Image (spheres, rainbow, N blue to C red):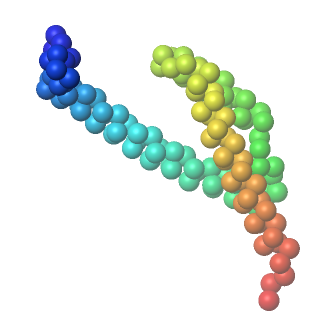
């Protein structure tokens, strides 16, 4: 693969093949990320129900700070920008808190509704 173009706008078939291979790998990683996020949210939903059942606050700033520090260190070890990792985790945490608030509201509504 010494050149990427034949000079007339056509891409070298070897370059196309390598690009397709790399994109297939990216697609597989994206699928894995989505599945891992789904598993993470299943676990955080369980946390939300446990917190609601015991009237614990939806957010846990101490845990969130520890998780951010932990993820930043993991990112550094993985040669990933720690600031990006922190932004990504903050986005996830905000979504988890939103879920926990909704679960708490639903749970409070269930407690306030008298049984018939």
Can residue 15 be seen in the rendering of this structure?
A: no
At x 46% / y 45%, what residue is drawn? 34
Position of 35 compared to 66: left or right?
left
Viewer-closest of 93 and 26: 26
Q: Which quadrant of the figure has residue 65?
A: top right
Q: Which quadrant of the figure has residue 15?
A: top left
Estimate the x, y position of residue 16 in percent, counting from the top left: 20, 28
Estimate the x, y position of residue 48 in percent, counting from the top left: 69, 54
Residue farthest to the top, as pictured:
2
At x 17% / y 16%, what residue is drawn? 7
**Picture layout, residue 10 above or below residue 57:** above
**Picture layout, residue 29 above or below residue 114:** above
Q: Which quadrant of the figure has residue 116?
A: bottom right
Estimate the x, y position of residue 67 in percent, counting from the top left: 66, 31
Q: How many marks?
A: 0
Residue farthest to the front, as pictured:
8
Viewer-closest of 6 and 64: 6
Viewer-closest of 21 and 110: 21
Position of 7 compared to 116: left or right?
left
Residue farthest to the bottom, as pictured:
116
Can residue 18 be seen in the rendering of this structure?
A: yes
At x 56% / y 53%, what residue is drawn? 42
**Picture layout, residue 67 above or below residue 80:** below
Position of 88 compared to 98: left or right?
left
**Picture layout, residue 97 above or below residue 52:** above
Viewer-closest of 58 and 88: 88
Quadrant containing the N terminus is top left
Estimate the x, y position of residue 84 in percent, counting from the top left: 58, 25
At x 76% / y 54%, what residue is drawn? 101
């Amino acid at each position: 693969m010494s050149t990427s173009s034949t000079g007339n706008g056509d891409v070298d078939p070897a370059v196309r093949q390598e690009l397709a291979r790399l994109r297939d790998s990216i697609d597989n990683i994206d699928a894995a990320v989505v599945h891992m996020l789904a598993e993470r949210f299943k676990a955080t939903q369980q946390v939300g129900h446990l917190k609601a059942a015991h009237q614990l606050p939806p957010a846990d700033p101490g845990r969130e700070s520890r998780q951010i520090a932990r993820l930043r260190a993991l990112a550094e070890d993985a040669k990933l920008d720690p600031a990006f990792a922190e932004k990504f985790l903050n986005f996830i945490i905000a979504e988890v808190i939103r879920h926990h608030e909704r679960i708490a509201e639903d749970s409070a509504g269930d407690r306030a509704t008298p049984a018939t």
